[in-house]
Every structure is written in structure tokens, then in C-alpha cells.
Image (cartoon, rainbow, N blue to C red):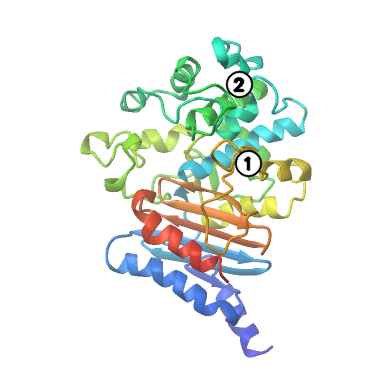
């Protein structure tokens, strides 16, 4: 065994703790630069916690920062959840229980007024349905600890912003209705369906929509003083419904309520780089990471974003961000996966950490 192999074996043995490294020495400077970008914000008090997971082929770099006790700690993923919800819907497509071209009203009959009858499952998964991102009474619903059923009712009735299929406009409520379709077909709660049909087959043992089996002490605190406006904006009055509240953590919002570790998010992304049929057929996987919104003002697959990643990423890169402070992507051209999970909301961490780290990693 040579010196490099000895180093790899030693560091790999720390996999359950704070660091795991199997990257070749040729990439050490880049990974040092990436970790320093994160560590600087830990040291100056801007950032409380973070996890970085990078994989290229069989080479892995994994590290926890700040207050994390383990690199496997689950973070609130924010909108990375949308990719997992979309995967659950596409499991049903693989089974022939729906087609993406099906009108939503086939499964939600009350969603049929006016142009709503033209909205398809594909429109929901590609942000082209005309639905808004959040409901007008979003804050009121959260303040009242409303169940998801009330969000569904509001989404069924809310005015459309534009004719279905005519433009791209980011819309969390579209993913909510896609989840509702899945629940009506399966007669199961989406958290349970994703657990058995997506997470378990892919070996994602540190992932749940909602809290699952996690306890409050297990999950990483979001620095909600920097929260997005729709999540309370850091206001003291929002403490019982913001990202850290028991209400929100347990709600299991299909557009932003999943918890997962960095390694599990990477497992999910890599199932699209190297499809093996465990959760989705290869043809379905390929379709989900192809551009379905060309000419509509965005670049979106089914649930996935196809732009906004590292400067060195190829045009084939896919992934998603999360407003809670997350960015995760995979590049088929280089077989490179990068997952950056932080406790600092993206409206701050985006420019300070998420995009600078992605730029560095995408160049290795």
C-alpha cells in the first residue's frame, strides 16, 4: 500500500464523523479552496452549520462544518424537495397510473374552471401552469398552522397568472398540486409513498418528507433571522410557523419540507447520472433532466432546474437550490456531483457560499 492509498484509507474511516476524503491529490487545492470559503464564514460568525459533499466517479469528499456533530446531519432542504416530489409523481408514470400529458382535472375534478382544464401534470412539474409560487394568504395559512389540505383548496381556486403552457414562472403551488395528484392516485400520504418508493430503494436512509423518524434535536437549525419573506422574514411573530417551528418541520410541504443529509441528496442526484431502475426507469430519468421549457423564459426539466450552477458546469448539468440555504447539482459530462447544505438562507449564503463554492468545485 503506497502513501496516497494509506491516506485515503485513513480519511475514509472518518465517514460517520466530520470528514471523509478519497479525492486524488490533484484536486486537493480546489477542495481546500472550497472548504476555506465555507470555513471563513463559520469563523467570522456568519454561518452556523454546513455540510459539503462532492463526488466524481468513485472519488468522494465529505465534510461537516461549524455546529454539526456529523456529516450525516439532516437539513431542511427547501425547494430541493421539489425534485423528490417530482420523482414520486414519475414513479406513477412508470407504472402507467398517469401520463405527464394528462390534464390535472382528471385526478382533481374540482380543478376545472376556465383555463385550469388545460393544465397538465407536465405544466405542474415545469412551472408553466400559470399558478403562483405562493398563495396570497400564505402567511395567514401558516400563522393558523393550516394543514396541507387548505393549501390545496387555495391552489385549486387561486387565479392563474397566465395561460397554461405559455411561459415559465416559478411556482411552488404547482408542485403542491402534483403531490395532491399522487396522493389521490395512491390513497397514501406522499411522505409515506416517497419513503417506500423513492428513498428506500435509493438507500436514502437519512431522508424524509417532513420529520419522519427524526427528532427535533436531529435536524439542523436554520438561521431564520435571514429567512425569506414567505417564511416569516425573521420576524419574532413568525417563530411558531417559520422554518424552525414544529409546525413547518412536520408539515411535509411537497415544495419545500424534506429533510436530508448531503450524502443522501448526492445519492438521489447520482441515481439520475447512473440510472439503475431501482426507483425510476432509465427513459423516465432521462426525460426528467431534459429541457421542457425551451422558449418559455426558463430552463427546466421535470422538477429539476437546468441552469444556475457552477461556472465550470456543462450545459447538461441538473439540480436545484433551496431558499433555506442549499444548492445541489450533478454534471453528466464530468460525472461530478456537488451538494452544499448550509444553515444560512440562500438570500445571504447564495453569493457568499453556495455559488462561489460551486464555481470552485465545478472546475476540478
State the residue in front, 265 or 192: 265
Q: Quadrant of residue 285?
A: top right
Placement of the C terminus among the 4 image quadrants: bottom right
Q: Residue furthest front?
A: 295
Placement of the N terminus among the 4 image quadrants: bottom right
Q: Looking at the rendered structure, which numbered label has been put on residue 119? A: 2
* Image spot of residue 255 (x, y percent): 50, 35
Q: Quadrant of residue 144?
A: top left
Q: Is residue 8 left or right of 242 when viewed as pictured?
A: right
The residue located at (41%, 51%) in the rendering is 325
Q: Secondary structure at mark 1?
A: loop
Q: Is residue 37 left or right of 225 when viewed as pictured?
A: right
Residue under numbered circle 1: 301
* Image spot of residue 279 (x, y percent): 72, 43
The reply to whether residue 328 is visible in this rendering is: yes
Mark toward the start of the polypeptide (2 vs 1): 2
| Local crowd size for mark 1, using a 10 Å CA cut-off: few (<14), some (14–19), many (≥20) | many
Please tell me whether residue 165 is drawn above or below residue 341 in the rendered image.
above
Q: Residue furthest left?
A: 236
Please tell me whether residue 193 is drawn above or below residue 283 in the rendered image.
above
| Local crowd size for mark 2, using a 10 Å CA cut-off: few (<14), some (14–19), many (≥20) | many
Amino acid at each position: 500500500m503506497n502513501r496516497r492509498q494509506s491516506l485515503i484509507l485513513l480519511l475514509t474511516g472518518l465517514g460517520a464523523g466530520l470528514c471523509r476524503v478519497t479525492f486524488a491529490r490533484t484536486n486537493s487545492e480546489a477542495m481546500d479552496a472550497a472548504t476555506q470559503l465555507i470555513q471563513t464564514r463559520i469563523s467570522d460568525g456568519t454561518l452556523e452549520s454546513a455540510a459539503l459533499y462532492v463526488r466524481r466517479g468513485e472519488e468522494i469528499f465529505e465534510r461537516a462544518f461549524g455546529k454539526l456533530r456529523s456529516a450525516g446531519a439532516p437539513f431542511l432542504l427547501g425547494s430541493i424537495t421539489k425534485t423528490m416530489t417530482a420523482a414520486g409523481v414519475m414513479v406513477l408514470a412508470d407504472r402507467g397510473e398517469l401520463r405527464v400529458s394528462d390534464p390535472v382535472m382528471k385526478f382533481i375534478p374540482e380543478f376545472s374552471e376556465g383555463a385550469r382544464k388545460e393544465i397538465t401534470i407536465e405544466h405542474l412539474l415545469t412551472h408553466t401552469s400559470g399558478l403562483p409560487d405562493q398563495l396570497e394568504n400564505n402567511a395567514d395559512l401558516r400563522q393558523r398552522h393550516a394543514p396541507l389540505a387548505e393549501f390545496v383548496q387555495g391552489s385549486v381556486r387561486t387565479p392563474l397568472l397566465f395561460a397554461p403552457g405559455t411561459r415559465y414562472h416559478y411556482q411552488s403551488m404547482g408542485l403542491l398540486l402534483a403531490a395532491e395528484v399522487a396522493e389521490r392516485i395512491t390513497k397514501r400520504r406522499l411522505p409515506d409513498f416517497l419513503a417506500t418508493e423513492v428513498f428506500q430503494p435509493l438507500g436514502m436512509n437519512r431522508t424524509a418528507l417532513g420529520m419522519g423518524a427524526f427528532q427535533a434535536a436531529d435536524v439542523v437549525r436554520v438561521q431564520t433571522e435571514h429567512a425569506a419573506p414567505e417564511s416569516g422574514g425573521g420576524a419574532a411573530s413568525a417563530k411558531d410557523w417559520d422554518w424552525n417551528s414544529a409546525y413547518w418541520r412536520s408539515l411535509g410541504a411537497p415544495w419545500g419540507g424534506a429533510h436530508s443529509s448531503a450524502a443522501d441528496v448526492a445519492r438521489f442526484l447520482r441515481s439520475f447520472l447512473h440510472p439503475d431502475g431501482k426507483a425510476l426507469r432509465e427513459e423516465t430519468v432521462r426525460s426528467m433532466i431534459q429541457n421542457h421549457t425551451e422558449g418559455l423564459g426558463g430552463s427546466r426539466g421535470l422538477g429539476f432546474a437546468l441552469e444556475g450552477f457552477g461556472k465550470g458546469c456543462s450545459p447538461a448539468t441538473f439540480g436545484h437550490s433551496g431558499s433555506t440555504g442549499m444548492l445541489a447539482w450533478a454534471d453528466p459530462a464530468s460525472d461530478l456531483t456537488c451538494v452544499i447544505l448550509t444553515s444560512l438562507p440562500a438570500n445571504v449564503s447564495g453569493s457568499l457560499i453556495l455559488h462561489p463554492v460551486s464555481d470552485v468545485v465545478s472546475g476540478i
